[in-house]
Amino acid sequence: MSAKGKVFQAHHAMGQRVRGTALVASDGFSARYDLDRIKGVFSRPSHQLVGQSYVGKILVVETAKGGVASAWMLHEMQSRGMAPLAFVFNSVNPILAQGAALAHLPMLAGFEEDITKAIPNGAELEIDPERGTITVLS
Amino acid sequence: MTAMKLNDEEQDMLAGKLGPLAREALRHQIMVGEFFGAEDFVPVTQAHIMADTESLGEAGVQWLEGLAANSEGRTGVCVPTITDPRGTDFAKAAFLGQTRSMLDLERRAIDAFVKLGVTMTDTCINYQTVQAPIRNEHVAFGDTGVVIYSNSVCGAYSNFEGGPSALSAGLTGRTPRYGFHLPGQRRATVHVRTEFTPETLNDWGALGAVIGRFAGNYWAVPVIEGIEGAPRSDQLKHFGAAMASFGSIALFHMVGVTPEADRLSDVAPAGLPSHRVGRDEVKALQASYHRDGKIDVVVFSAPQLSLYELRDLAALCDKRSFSVPLLAVTSPQVKPDSDRMGYTARIENAGGTVLSGMCFYQSYAREIAEAKGWKRLVTNSAKLVNILGGYGYQPMLGSMEACVDAAVSGRMT
């Protein structure tokens, strides 16, 4: 069944409205533990997205893991143009929210459904933090 | 999103009456607070900033320098604000293969922090070495290991505060009241029954890791029942640090041990989901990292070692001679005592190196691996094995004794 046209409502949201391609995994996210930040790819061998680039993608993942360092790292990644376009989490750790606030990256979290199952990998999305919504465009 | 209630002082800050630093810090805190539905701010007595330069990068250091250059209104922190480990031990940087640009960045960050009135303690064990928070004290601590220990063992109130947020708390003297500042958020969400009370630090870390893995996210609060006797501070340090690293957990309760949980019913509603964890799970977690054969380096770090850990390590190093490098990382508060007591000399006479004010994984571990050819690493820190997998290492977890034996033989068996 196509998800096109579906709208998902988040409990928590910040940042500006963006459109982009979803990179989806039912796995966690830690900027320090999971990434090769220089190359812009997932590097932890056991991560579902190992080897894949997150740069410019709307990252749709389960939760934020560990690492207080992420609060700085999103800002540093953004300064080099090597950050995701936006973050979507089922459940979010304060560190990622603090990091997104510093880096001015849109972030949505907390949905009625498991958002990593509801959004197909590669879908085109519009994120609207003002309304707290994700719309599947195609 | 509901707007946070601001008192007069906060409204003045937001209006810029205390200068641009307090205004920008408060704006940042409001963004985060409103994201999490905080109703208002709560005053904090201490802040602790995680800000090694590997994380900051050039962009983060420039941001700090921008703050430090301000001369209008409030120019620095207004509550005691201390730092997590730095990205190097300047005295040992050449040995670690660190480059001049790493050290230059580190010096610039330190200069900026000092200008902002930050106290450079460079430690992730401030609860053992600087000043442990007390029960019900609201603080803004960074470093997941510091937060979980302060919340759980001390009964203080803190969220994970990343560097920018901890610095903001230092600049405004407050933090948004959400998460673990709210008593209701501190109730247990998962019950863990264990018949296994570990002895060694690696077993304590592995037990924390197992619980962190299944508890699984920041808002989960495990309550652990079945631990015998009174664990030592170093044991709970490894237990909490591993749980926070594997599961992003910020608070646990241990029935009869931690201050909020004299009895299970003090923290746990009836009918909590329950898990059993035993020796088998703890050993299986460690076995999953094990590989026979040659090793490149032994590292004791994450968290920094206490004086007691260095004392134990020194005793194991007597009359030994290492065939691979052995690193023991401690805080700048502990290092002079370790020197004075002769522990440093005993570890270094065997061929080891005692480092201070850094932490192995916050010190360009990936670049160190490349510069030194270190890949197969042995440690007694469950937190460290979890982190270094993502940094190109093959980490292995063993007891302090097994680690020292491996440094002598150059092999893990």
Image (cartoon, rainbow, N blue to C red):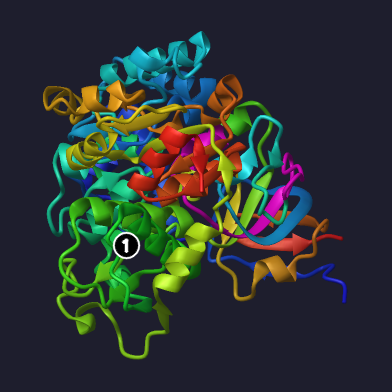
Task: Give, as a single range, the part of the protein colored magenta.
Answer: A50-75
Task: Indicate the quadrant where residue B345 lies.
Answer: top left
Say which residue appears at 34% left-offset and 46% top-offset.
B401
The relative height of residue B22 versus residue B278 in the rendered view (above or below) is above
Residue B86 locus on image (x, y percent): 37, 26
Q: Is residue A61 magenta?
A: yes
Type of amino acid under label 1 = Leu
The relative height of residue B84 versus residue B140 in the rendered view (above or below) is above
Q: Number of callouts in the render?
A: 1
**Which chain is indicated by disc 1?**
B
Question: Are there few (<14), some (14-19), or many (20+) residues within 10 Å of tag 1?
Answer: many
Q: Is residue A74 magenta?
A: yes
Say which residue appears at 27% left-offset and 30% top-offset.
B319
Say which residue appears at 12% left-offset and 53% top-offset.
B134
In the displayed structure, does residue A30 sit left or right of residue A126? left
Residue B23 visible in the current orientation: yes
Residue B138 visible in the current orientation: no
> Which residue is at the front of the view, B25 or A52?
A52
> Which residue is at the front of the view, B202 or A3?
B202
Say which residue appears at 19% left-offset and 80% top-offset.
B266
Query: What residue occupies the far front of the structure in this picture?
Result: B319
